[in-house]
Amino acid sequence: MESGIFAAMALDRYVAICHPLRHSTILTNPIVAKIGLAMVLRCGMLALPYPFLARQWPYCRTNIIPQQLCLHMAVVNLACADIRISSYYGLFVQFSVM
């Protein structure tokens, strides 16, 4: 979500610098709403598979996560099965956000 906010802010600054007199006609309220909706949908589409991936493995160790945050890889590392799919998906998300 943060990278989407930064991209929206960068677009706003680009329009403000390159087209200062047309800023309000280019970035109207419907356009800003569409940018916000695209940002939320992108975040949702990338984050939605995480709970489904973590739910499919059997867990045989302790259920205590050694961190304060419930990160996806911290939960998946407690699984007894092969977690390569989750690792590959996390790597895909990192590269697609960049």
Image: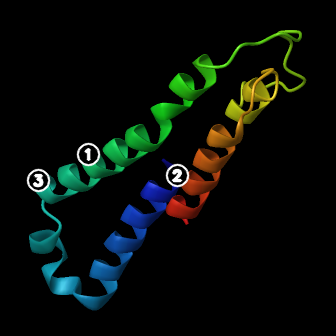
Give whichever of discs 2 and 1 has the lower sequence position. 2
Taking the image as drawn, is residue 69 in sight? Answer: no
| Residue 69 on image: x %, y % | 76, 27
| Residue 72 on image: x %, y % | 68, 31
Give whichever of discs 3 and 1 has the lower sequence position. 3
Which residue is label 3 attached to? 30
Query: Gap in Å between the C-alphas at discs 2 and 3?
Result: 21 Å
Q: Residue at x 88, y 12 (%)?
A: 61
Q: What element carries label 2?
A: helix
Mark 2 and mark 3 residues within 8 Å of each other at the beta carbon: no
Q: Which residue is drawn at 45% across and 32% down?
A: 48
For label 1, the crowd category at 10 Å Cα-Cα, with few meaning under 14, some 14 to 19 and many 20 or more, is few
Residue, far bottom? 18
Residue, far front? 82
Query: Gap in Å between the C-alphas at discs 3 and 1?
Result: 10 Å
Give whichever of discs 2 and 3 has the lower sequence position. 2
User: Which image quadrant is residue 22 in?
Assistant: bottom left
Front-most of 93 and 23?
A: 93
**Residue 87 relative to residue 97: left or right:** right
Which residue is label 2 attached to? 2
| Residue 84 on image: x %, y % | 70, 41
For label 2, the crowd category at 10 Å Cα-Cα, with few meaning under 14, some 14 to 19 and many 20 or more, is few
Numbered tag placed on residue 5 in the rendering: none
Query: Gap in Å between the C-alphas at discs 2 and 1?
Result: 14 Å
- Amino acid type of the residue that numbered disc 1 sits on in the rendered structure: Leu
Observer-side mark, 2 or 3, equals 2
Color encoding of the figure: rainbow
Front-most of 11 and 76?
A: 76
Numbered tag placed on residue 37 in the rendering: 1
| Residue 40 on image: x %, y % | 35, 43
- Amino acid type of the residue that numbered disc 3 sits on in the rendered structure: Pro
